[in-house]
Image (tube, coloured by chain):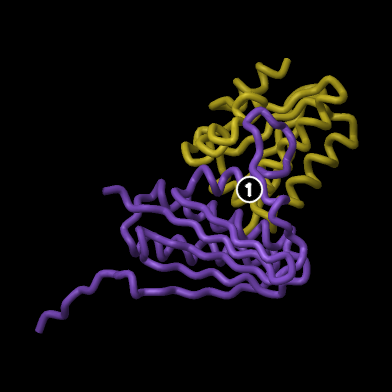
Chain colours: A purple, B yellow
Amino acid sequence: MNQAVSTPDDTDVVDLRIPCKAEWVALARLSVAAVASRLKFSIDEIEDIKLAVAEACTNAIQHANGSQYIEIKCEAVDGLRISVRDYGLGTRPEHIRSRELDDERVGGLGVFLIRSLMDDVDYVVHPDQGTLLVMVKRLPV
Amino acid sequence: MDIKVNVREAQADCYIVELSGEIDVYTSPKVKDAIGDLIDRGIYNLVIDLEKVRYIDSTGLGVLIGGLKRVREHGGSVNLVCTNPQIRKIFDITGLVKIFGIFETEDAAMKALV
């Protein structure tokens, strides 16, 4: 008897919680890459998603003072919707900014990359409760 | 996941830093230390070979920018070797192609330094 092959739909959710430490970022980006691959993104798009997730986690590690964990949620909504949540105290909304292209300073590169590589990016910042970053990569029509 | 750093002298006052692996928030301090050690020794002309690098993020870019700024203070320069389209793309979208010389071979990167 043949088994039906199911495809991911918008009720499918993959949750990952990693320690807020540099050595776990690779696990996060590789896990999300596996989800993106399951959703039929191209290799180039998967690389974009990997980098955006890594940048989000890196920002949490570097700026979310006191956060023990980073939570990453992947949903098959609008392509792939990824939420990255930390529970740190350090970030203020005005500190989340991108950079100018001719700026040789290091700061802001991560946010710039996230905004460049993903289709929708939204930050929800509560200075006392951490930061939620929601980003979407759409599948080409 | 790791990064391997191989430093070798190519010619007088010019060194090649060959990197292999993935450069991220965890591994970039090792790259920063290797480049910083060379600069501390008075070596201000560097070729950084990224041909065996499979992945780089903003912390890796930051290390390269930091190295470039330090050697420029002494009249030196940093050229990169990179043909991986994914990595080239990151330099393109961040505008870093304007501040780094990026070449297809170590020889070409070296010749452009001197």
Q: Position of residue A52 (x, y in %)?
A: 54, 53
Q: Amino acid at mark 1?
A: Gly
- The extreme left residue here reads A1
**Could you tell me which residue is drawn at 53 percent across and 40 percent down?**
B87
Along the line of sight, which residue is nearer the eye, B64 or A57?
A: A57
Question: Which residue is the site of mark 1?
Answer: A110
Q: Position of residue B95 (x, y in %)?
A: 60, 30
Local crowd at mark 1 within 10 Å, few (<14), some, or many (≥20)?
A: many
Along the line of sight, which residue is nearer the eye, A83 or B30?
A: A83
- The extreme bottom residue here reads A1
Horizontal arrangement in the rendering, residue A65 relative to residue B91 (left or right): right
Q: Quadrant of residue A9?
A: bottom left
Q: Position of residue B62 (x, y in %)?
A: 71, 42
**Could you tell me which residue is drawn at 66 percent across and 17 percent down?**
B112
Q: Quadrant of the N terminus of chain B?
A: bottom right
Q: Secondary structure at mark 1?
A: helix
Q: Position of residue A10 (x, y in %)?
A: 33, 70
- Up-down: is A56 above or below B31? below
Q: Chain of mark 1?
A: A
Horizontal arrangement in the rendering, residue B39 relative to residue B113 (left or right): right
**Could you tell me which residue is drawn at 87 percent across and 23 percent down?**
B74
- Up-down: is B96 above or below B29? above
**Could you tell me which residue is drawn at 63 percent across and 70 percent down?**
A70
Q: Quadrant of residue B27?
A: bottom right
